[in-house]
Image: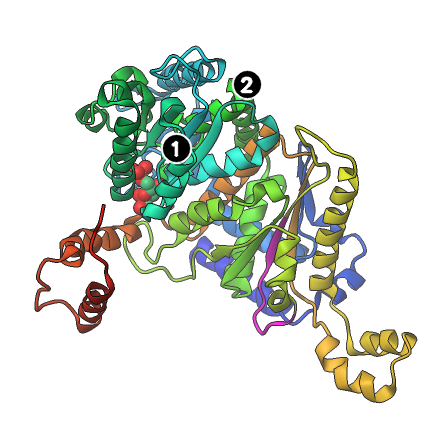
Amino acid sequence: MTELASQWAEVQQQAKRLKPVHLRELFAQDPNRFAKYSAHFHDLLLDFSKEKIDQAALNALLALAKAAKVEHWRDQMLSGAKINSTEHRAVLHTALRGGANANLIIDGQDVNAEVAEVKERFLAFAEQVRKGEYLASNGQAFTDVVNIGIGGSDLGAVMVTQALAPYHDGPRTHFVSNVDGAHIADTLAKLNPQTTLLIIASKTFTTAETMLNFATALAWLKVGIGEENSGKHLVAVSTNLERTRQFGIDDSRVFGFWDWVGGRYSLWSSVGLSIAIAVGAKNFQALLDGAKAMDEHFRTAPLAQNLPVLLASIGVWRRNGLNYPTVGLMPYDQRLARFPAYVQQLDMESNGKSVTRDGTAVSTTTGPIVWGEPGTNSQHSFFQLIHQGTDVIPVDFLLAANDHHAKPIPGLYQHQTVLMTNALAQANALAFGRTADEVRAEMQDSGAKPEAIEELVAHRTFKGDRPSTMLVYKTLDPYTLGMLVALFEHKVFVQGIIWNINSYDQWGVELGKKLATALQPIVAGAPIPDSLDSSTRGLIEHIHQLRQEETL
Ligand code: F6P
């Protein structure tokens, strides 16, 4: 048996031992669980003491990470090795925040020098827009910026801009991603083309949704301000300069990045232009600095204290040891409302794979289904199932100790206390539950009759033994947000290495795109070929019957 196989077997063995042991029992056995199963970096605390884990299990997981050569692959990534094997690309989003090795040359490019040059250009442009130095064609300052992009060219910028709302003192920012015309129509309806800047963000500059949204927005712009004035209102963010030129976007307003930055890892690049326009170059730099600090921690901290490695190990434990297929990601931080959506792409597009790096079928389950909503709203919708449903759904809580507001109003301190209290209460209820005897005692104390107690006791009992991890930070400032995002990026990386999959390609999105291209003329009215399956044919025929004549 190889070292790796024997460590996998050890993890399974530990999981078999611990699965029947209730979290109540684990806490009763060891009053020091919090101290033992928590770790810090800066003001970030990772508390995983409410996971069904003990020292032997943790040791097994860390030994598995070691046997999977996580440290070797991490160093390979940071040194610019082409670890994205199916696309023959390096993976260097860390270089965007200054976290990659010095003197890095990839395919003849001086990575750090190029990153510095593009960063200087796009941050300078962001400042010019903010200060009213780069003006709209009518000579006025831009009031609104619309970022048109999808997936990695959208989600990071949306999430960060919302998260950093207290720092938003630049023009208003809007994001259009969905090809559904409602998205662009509802966005543009509120805007004045005279003072609106469009950023077309697309790594490839070929993504169908983005190109169509761009065409529609451009037509709107031309009608509003005239074709001759539209050029000044267009900015592109892309690796594909040939295509941006084909679209007539002036090179001076094209901000590049590189094929060694994956779309879902790109918010740190010029894809973050809308963020920089919203919050300014200084805050954008603080975001990068926070991520860089996490890179450094990931690079240097021993595995047992390494937050990304610990978070990844907990995920492997839940997924492969205890066989939980999903994870709930619940930010108790309203401004992180889009964090679950962002992490969905980061995690599920990276680790939703069924073959290993060499193309053979995986022998373990891989990436979990990630989903979530901010607390406390989530408590009043789906937490019922997490507490009492038939599946165990581990939860990751994110929690700020302090709120902060650009324009505080009286009473907010109390909100934060209530918010935090709720997160703590949920984690507690999930772990320890409420026994039937406790329900009986409580109901008796409140004067309920014995028949009423027996009627409800089963319904009011909580089994507990439902694991959760809590990430607590001081305040959601740009630096902290940078640390948090990089933490999740590296967690995904570590899990990909442990599962021996390539986390940096995304072939699974190809087929749907190809079929959509083929079906488009048929949906638009071309004859339906005989080869089409009966379901798709039936749906298209039905849609044709329902579809109204185009009037615009
Ligand atoms: O379809 C998935 C995807 O390729 C993502 O990986 C990417 O972030 C998104 O589409 C957008 O791609 P682009 O930036 O090239 O428009």
Which residue position holds label 2?
282
- Which of the two residues, 449 or 483, is positioned nearer the viewer here? 449
Q: Disc 2 residue type?
A: Lys
Mark seen at residue 355: none
Pick whichever, 358 or 160, lies toward us: 160
Kindly tell me whether mark 1's CB lies below 8 Å from ligand 1: no
Q: Is residue 41 left or right of residue 512?
A: right
Residue at 45% x, 43% y: name it: 493
245, above or below 150, in the image: above
* SS category of the residue bearing label 1: strand
256 vs 23, left or right, is left
At which x and y percent is residue 347?
45, 48
With respect to residue 360, does 144 lie above or below?
above
Residue 436, quarter of picture = bottom right
Q: Quadrant of ligand 1?
A: top left
Point out the stretch of residues depicted in magenta: 388-397
Left or right: residue 481 compared with residue 202: right
Q: Residue 380 at x, y = what percent?
A: 65, 61
- Does residue 100 appear in this view? no
Image quadrant assignment for residue 265: top left
Colour approach in the figure = rainbow
User: Can residue 140 be seen at all in this image of the molecule?
Assistant: yes
Mark toward the start of the polypeptide (1 vs 2): 1
Q: Which residue is mark 1?
A: 147
Q: Is residue 164 above or below residue 330?
A: above
Q: State the CA–CA distance, disc 1 to disc 2.
A: 20 Å
Q: Residue furthest front?
A: 551
**Please, what is the dominant secondary structure of the magenta stretch?**
loop
> Front-most of 106 and 115?
115
Name the residue at the top extreme. Answer: 133
Q: Quadrant of residue 235?
A: top left
Q: Establish whether ligand 1 lies closer than 8 Å to the Cβ of label 2.
A: no
